[in-house]
Image: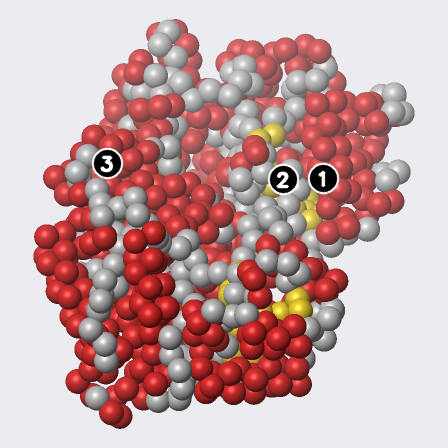
């Protein structure tokens, strides 16, 4: 008896060979495909030759590969059937695309190809079309070929996971110079225009994933992309860039973008807080994008859908991709296997996610295959639902059970894999620290409103620290309001919040700045970058000299008026921060302010051709004691009036960034007339007409810059004059002047509030020490050095003088820095006085006023002691 098995095996082989996927033959499969897909019926009816083409042995062979070369041959052959215009070539390309989609859909519907093969072939066709469109866009435009240009695909196309009716997410990039920017954008616009020529049935493109989205540059340079992603890039952009892949254009440029993708999407230092952000993004999609009635039907964005699987994969890639390079791939299914290999997700759960992903992507393809529409909604019509189920080889009940089962599994795994997905207690700001809680509440709402998740997350980290620091501020309401203004001006809020949350000292410094000065707050709001520039440099710990400032000013080679003003503001800001941080004492702050003014004077004298005049510093400039809001008391000696006038304009002319300094020439002869005079005029005036107070003012005279020979001659004259007057001090005139000043200056407030001219105020210490030095024939411009002379003879008096003077100068400094302007009286109003007291370290205004009164009393006694006279 013959062996039956060879015949049986031949019969089985014949059946297998004749069957086509889940159908018995190609014809049966094609018939079912047309019944299922309205799109297929319409196209085959319009193009009967396409049906014959698919039936052909070569094309119906699932193993036949149709790559870019074969597609290009078919496209070239089809061109003869269309007008020889650009529109005709685009139409030929569209028809080629639709025919290829039908072939892929047919193999998909018949279950001849698995999901991965279907998605890769759909992506391959899209890549081919993009290469052709780029070629067509460049034709006839030589400038478009003069720089590297690439089309990077994102999303499903980037991952080689494209479906039938999805938009294709693209980013255009170039690597030309700034001169190529316009042509790069013109090329980008041309490509967009070519897509529109297809008039439907082609690809819809989405360019919103480029840097800054729809408001960004259409074709950014590679450098622009780098700057954007690493300064402004959000976590969702890290996830999106995972899929970035070259679809068309310059390969070398695409490779450089690939390096950028690797560094940005897979950072070395990223915490699992990233998972919390994924939860927030997904929650926002469910709330804002999906209507309530579509959440259960949407297999992409709904609960337990495709997007949750993609989020799981991409979040793990971003967090662990740098540690495990194997995770840096683009395919969702391949990466799921890698997550298991890296020990990040158990094998059982990986398999569950893969099964759900394959099922939902196949279902997605079926939904879109029906009418070539971009949909992710399961139909609510029973008949339509049955057709979809049948196309997957399932009964309706099985189909619905599988959907619910996979949804539940994905949602369960999504929740379990993100440990930070549990609800956290929202931080509640303590409004009791504010004098005006409602105002603070509005400011906090403004601070929290309208930000990306990354920014909100950074702000949440910052808020507890912000509350802690605000508690220690004198005026928390004011500090918070100014902080909100600063964040609005700063621009990169996520970076700012992250930086401040990581640096409590920087946050405290910023708030103390807002607490201390309106003037410096305004500088910072005008130039927000100053804060970071100063804090990052060593400048806060450096006391600059005249030479240091001068060297930096010498580097400014144009627009001197404006750029000198900007430079000065930056340096004032730096010195101010040194002050409020306690990195320099009052004497050092005054010396540095003076050095800045001197350096600007020295450089400006050259620029204004005024160097033939000698500039003598008087007052606090002469004593190297310039402070906030100080004018420059000067004498100009020489004959160069035009240079002096130009210098005065250079300093005091108002510009959009303010002035440099105001000169004060009131100490010149008669306090009026030309601002520059010959030395002989000065000598004649001081010898024959000057009053004693004018002579006394000369004790501060010091050469600053300009003609040194003239200056030294004048200084020798001053020394002789000073010595001569010290032999016959007119005491009556001296005391009469002091009394008149005390009565007339700041007479609008009670004497106790006049910290400068009140008995025992700053004026008494200055006048008293000057007279003491004059009695000993010592001319010392620096008051601080004058105290050292006093210390040699009377240490107790010197200590008392320095203590009283320093306290009042600190009071003055705190008041002056508010507006960077002269102030000589205390605030009378209670709230302002309270703030001053706290800024000076007192618990209350009462404590401050008690100590202040004691200082005035002590200084008055010291004045009597220094003058060796009893007050009349």
Residue neighbourhood size for the residue with mark 3, other residues' Cα within 10 Å, grouped as few (<14), some (14–19), many (≥20): many
Question: Is there a contact, CB below 8 Å, between mark 1 and mark 2?
Answer: yes
How far, Cα to Cα, is label 3 from label 1? 46 Å
Where is residue 792 drawn, in percent x and y? 26, 92
The tag on residue 440 is 3
Quarter-of-image position of residue 795: bottom left
Q: Against 719, is 145 above or below?
A: above
Q: In this image, 815 relative to 376: left or right?
A: left
Q: In this image, 193 relative to 431: left or right?
A: right
How far, Cα to Cα, is label 1 from label 2? 8 Å
Q: Nearer the viewer, residue 559 or 59?
A: 559
User: Earlier along the polypeptide chain: callout 3 or callout 1?
Assistant: 1
What secondary structure is marked by label 3? helix
The tag on residue 185 is 1
Q: Nearer the viewer, residue 110 or 408?
A: 408
How far, Cα to Cα, is label 2 from label 3? 38 Å
Residue neighbourhood size for the residue with mark 1, other residues' Cα within 10 Å, grouped as few (<14), some (14–19), many (≥20): some
Where is residue 306 drawn, in percent x and y? 37, 33
User: Earlier along the polypeptide chain: callout 1 or callout 2?
Assistant: 1
Where is residue 364 drawn, in percent x and y? 44, 26
Determine the residue positioned at 27% across, 78% down. 867
Where is residue 231 drawn, in percent x and y? 48, 53
Quarter-of-image position of residue 352: top left
Q: In this image, 715 relative to 387: left or right?
A: right
The tag on residue 217 is 2
What secondary structure is marked by label 2? loop
Image quadrant containing the C terminus? bottom left
């Amino acid at each position: 008896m013959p062996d039956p098995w060879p015949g049986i095996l031949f019969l089985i082989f014949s059946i297998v060979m004749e069957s086509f996927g889940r159908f018995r033959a190609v014809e049966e499969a094609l018939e079912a495909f047309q019944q299922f897909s309205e799109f297929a019926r319409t196209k085959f009816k319009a193009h009967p030759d396409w049906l014959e083409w698919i039936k052909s042995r070569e094309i119906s062979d699932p193993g036949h590969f149709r790559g870019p070369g074969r597609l290009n041959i078919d496209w070239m052959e089809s061109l003869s059937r269309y007008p020889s215009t650009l529109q005709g070539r685009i139409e030929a390309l569209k028809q080629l695309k639709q025919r290829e989609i039908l072939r892929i859909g047919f193999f998909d519907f018949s279950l001849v190809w698995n999901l991965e093969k279907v998605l890769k072939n759909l992506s391959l066709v899209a890549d081919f079309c993009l290469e052709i469109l780029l070629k067509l866009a460049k034709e006839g435009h030589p400038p478009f070929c003069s720089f590297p240009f690439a089309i990077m695909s994102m999303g499903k196309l980037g991952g080689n996971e494209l479906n039938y009716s999805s938009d294709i997410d693209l980013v255009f990039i170039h690597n030309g110079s700034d001169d190529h920017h316009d042509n790069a954008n013109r090329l980008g616009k041309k490509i967009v225009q070519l897509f529109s020529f297809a008039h439907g049935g082609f690809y819809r493109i989405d360019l919103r994933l480029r840097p800054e989205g729809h408001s960004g540059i259409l074709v950014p340079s590679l450098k622009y992309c780098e700057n954007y992603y690493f300064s402004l890039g959000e976590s969702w952009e890290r996830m999106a860039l995972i899929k970035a892949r070259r679809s068309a254009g310059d390969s070398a440029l695409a490779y450089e973008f690939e390096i950028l993708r690797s560094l940005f999407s897979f950072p070395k230092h990223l915490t699992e807080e990233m998972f919390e952000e994924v939860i927030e993004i997904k929650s926002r999609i469910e709330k804002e994008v999906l209507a309530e009635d579509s959440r259960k039907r949407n297999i992409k964005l709904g609960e337990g859908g495709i997007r949750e699987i993609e989020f799981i994969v991409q979040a793990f890639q971003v967090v662990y991709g740098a540690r495990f390079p194997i995770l840096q791939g683009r395919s969702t299914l391949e990466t799921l296997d890698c997550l298991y290999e890296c020990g990040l997700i158990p094998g059982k759960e990986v398999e569950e996610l893969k099964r759900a992903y394959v099922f939902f992507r196949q279902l997605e393809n079926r939904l879109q295959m029906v009418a070539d529409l971009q949909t992710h909604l399961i139909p609510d019509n029973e008949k339509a639902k049955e057709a979809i189920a049948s196309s997957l080889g399932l009964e309706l009940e099985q189909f619905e059970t599988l959907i619910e089962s996979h949804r539940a599994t994905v949602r369960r795994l999504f929740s379990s894999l993100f440990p930070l997905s549990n609800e956290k207690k929202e931080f509640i700001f303590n409004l009791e620290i504010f004098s005006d809680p409602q105002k603070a509440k509005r400011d906090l709402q403004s601070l929290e409103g309208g930000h990306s998740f990354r920014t909100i997350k950074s702000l949440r980290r910052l808020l507890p620290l912000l509350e802690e620091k605000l508690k220690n501020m004198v005026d928390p309401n004011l500090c918070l309001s100014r902080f909100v203004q600063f964040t609005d001006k700063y621009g990169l809020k996520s970076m700012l919040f992250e930086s401040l949350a990581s640096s409590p000292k920087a946050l405290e410094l910023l708030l103390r700045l807002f607490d201390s000065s309106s003037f410096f707050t305004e500088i910072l709001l005008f130039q927000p970058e100053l804060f970071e520039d100063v804090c990052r440099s060593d400048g806060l710990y450096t006391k600059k000299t005249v030479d240091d400032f001068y060297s930096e000013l010498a580097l400014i080679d144009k627009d001197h008026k404006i750029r000198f003003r900007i430079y000065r503001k930056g340096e004032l800001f730096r010195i101010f921060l040194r002050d409020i941080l306690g990195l320099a004492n009052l004497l050092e702050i005054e010396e540095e302010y003076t050095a800045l003014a001197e350096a600007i004077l020295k450089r400006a004298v050259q620029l204004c051709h005024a160097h033939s005049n000698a500039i003598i510093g008087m007052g606090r400039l002469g004593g190297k004691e310039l402070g906030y809001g100080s004018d420059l008391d000067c004498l100009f000696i020489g004959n160069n009036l035009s240079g002096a006038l130009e210098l005065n304009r250079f300093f005091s002319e108002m510009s959009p960034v303010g002035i440099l300094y105001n000169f004060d020439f009131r100490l010149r002869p008669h306090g009026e007339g030309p601002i520059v005079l010959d030395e002989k005029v000065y000598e004649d005036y001081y010898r024959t007409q000057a009053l004693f107070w004018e002579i006394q003012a000369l004790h501060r005279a010091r050469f600053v810059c300009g003609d040194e020979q003239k200056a030294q001659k004048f200084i020798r004259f001053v020394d002789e004059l000073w010595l001569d007057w010290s032999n016959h001090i007119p005491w009556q005139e001296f005391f009469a002047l002091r009394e008149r000043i005390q009565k007339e200056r700041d007479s609008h407030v009670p004497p106790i509030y006049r910290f400068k001219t009140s008995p025992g105020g700053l004026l008494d210490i200055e006048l008293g020490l000057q007279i003491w030095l004059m009695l000993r024939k010592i001319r010392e411009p620096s008051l601080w050095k004058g105290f050292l002379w006093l210390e040699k003879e009377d240490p107790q008096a010197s200590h008392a003088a320095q203590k009283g003077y320093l306290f009042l100068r600190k009071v003055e400094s705190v008041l002056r820095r508010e507006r960077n302007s002269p102030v000589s009286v205390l605030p009378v109003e209670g709230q302002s006085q309270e703030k001053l007291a706290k800024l000076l370290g007192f618990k209350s205004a009462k404590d401050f006023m008690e100590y202040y009164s004691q200082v005035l009393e002590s200084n008055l006694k010291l004045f009597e002691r220094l003058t060796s006279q009893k007050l009349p």
